[in-house]
Image (cartoon, helix red, strand yellow):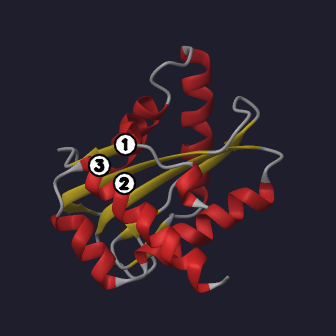
Amino acid sequence: MLEKFIRPERIVLDLNIKNKWKILEVLTRIYCKDMPDKIKDNIFYSVLWREMKFSTGLGGGIAIPHGRTECVSELGLLFARFNKSINWHSIDSKRVNYVFLVIGPMDATETYLNILSNISKLLSRKMMRKTILETNNIKKICQLILNSEERKTKRYK
């Protein structure tokens, strides 16, 4: 399922930002690069509101900030990796190296929840996290994610 949404231009490596709130702002701006400011703001506030409600730090160095808004018609992802971990107030109190930003329309609940689940499963594998952390090529990271999805699909056929 992730293969439909992950693209090299929405993979960001090694940003030098230490503040979770600033990271959310920067990642949202990157995600919304070609959108009007009003839509960028709406998307950012939907992500910010969700994060303020409850931390999206899942544990194991992973955070999946997300937001739903009427400003988008389809679901999208942005992946960011940080070599220096960030304090995200995760449920296990561990710092975060991997952030998947998920933006979706209000009416795509099932797809939205499936994406969140698939990301969690993908990064629950220590070897996958280690490989992504050590790889400095965006296209290779994209391919790792896509290959992982292909293996999962073949396993269940």
- Residue placed under numbered mark 2 in the picture: 142
Q: Residue at x 33, y 72 (%)?
A: 61
Furthest toward the top, the residue is: 36
CB within 8 Å, label 2 to label 3: yes
- Residue placed under numbered mark 1 in the picture: 8
Disc on the earlier residue, 1 or 3? 1
Q: Distance between the residues labelled 2 and 1?
A: 6 Å
Foreground residue, 92 or 73? 73
Foreground residue, 118 or 55? 118
CB within 8 Å, label 2 to label 1: yes
Q: Helix, strand, or loop for circle 3?
A: helix
CB within 8 Å, label 1 to label 3: yes
Q: Residue at x 30, y 44 (%)?
A: 12
- Residue placed under numbered mark 3 in the picture: 139
Can residue 149 be seen here? The reply is yes
Q: In this view, does 149 lie above or below 42?
A: below
The amino acid type found where label 2 is placed reads: Cys
Horizontal side of residue 56 vs 123, given as left or right: right
The residue carrying pointer 2 sits among few (fewer than 14), some (14 to 19) or many (20 or more) residues within 10 Å by Cα, namely some
Q: Which residue is drawn at 40% across and 51% down?
A: 79
| Quadrant in which the N terminus appears | bottom right
Can residue 94 be seen here? The reply is no
| Quadrant in which the C terminus appears | bottom right
Horizontal side of residue 67 vs 83, given as left or right: right
Q: Where is residue 97 in the image (x, y as percent from the top left)?
A: 28, 64
The residue carrying pointer 1 sits among few (fewer than 14), some (14 to 19) or many (20 or more) residues within 10 Å by Cα, namely some
Q: Is residue 126 above or below residue 130?
A: below
Foreground residue, 125 or 30? 125
Q: How far apart are marks 2 and 3 (CA)?
A: 5 Å
Q: Helix, strand, or loop for circle 1?
A: helix
Q: Quadrant of residue 36?
A: top right
